[in-house]
Image (tube, rainbow, N blue to C red):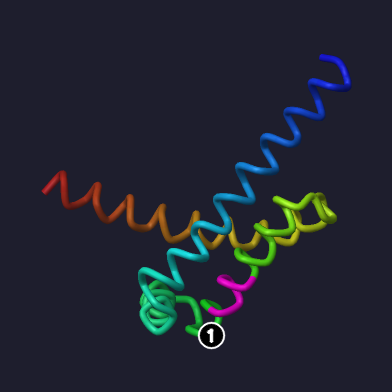
Amino acid sequence: MNANSNEIAGLTLRLALGTMYVSHALWKILTLGLPTTVQFFAAQGFPGWTAYAVVAAELGGGVLLILGVQVRAVALLLIPVLLGALKVHRSQQRRLGKECRS
């Protein structure tokens, strides 16, 4: 791969990840609403207030990724958001798996 290919790959990944974060933040704000998001977070075992921090991180971090501002630092700071989402989705997957086997 040459330098130009690496730049295109980095741009593509940065835009895709940034778009994913922004779309998830907007979904929480516009579709669910923040009060429902807070209740969902609390039901998953997270403190309710973390919903506000997660939405802010997703929206702000996603925009920064799309704009190419401090990409590595922003991506590192967003890792806890991904780990929290992984925890929620894995627990839902286990729950659905048990229901399907019953």
Q: Residues within 10 Å of mark 1 (few under 14, many from 20)?
A: few
* x 55%, y 50%: residue: 20
Residue extending farthest to the top is: 1
Residue extending farthest to the right is: 3
Tell me the quarter of the picture where residue 7 sits.
Answer: top right
**Residue 36: % across, % down:** 36, 79
Q: Is residue 60 magenta?
A: no
Residue extending farthest to the left is: 102
Secondary element at tag 1: loop
**Residue 82: % across, % down:** 58, 56
Secondary structure mostly taken by the magenta-highlighted segment of the chain: helix
**Part of the protein shown in magenta:** 52-56
**Residue 23: % across, % down:** 51, 57
Question: From the viewer's perspective, is residue 2 above or below residue 64?
Answer: above
User: Which one is nearer the viewer's eye here, 85 or 5?
Assistant: 5
* x 67%, y 56%: residue: 79
* x 40%, y 72%: residue: 44
Tell me the quarter of the picture where residue 40 sits.
Answer: bottom left
Q: What residue type is labelled 1?
A: Trp
Question: From the viewer's perspective, is residue 58 above or below residue 5?
Answer: below
**Residue 1: % across, % down:** 82, 14
Q: Is residue 3 left or right of residue 16?
A: right
Q: In this view, does 102 lie to the left or right of 56?
A: left
Tell me the quarter of the picture where residue 50 sits.
Answer: bottom right
Question: From the viewer's perspective, is residue 37 above or below residue 102?
Answer: below
Question: From the viewer's perspective, is residue 55 above or below residue 49?
Answer: above
User: Which one is nearer the viewer's eye here, 51 or 83?
Assistant: 51
Number of labels in the image equals 1
Q: In this view, does 91 lie to the left or right of 81?
A: left
Label 1 belongs to which residue? 49
* x 57%, y 59%: residue: 22
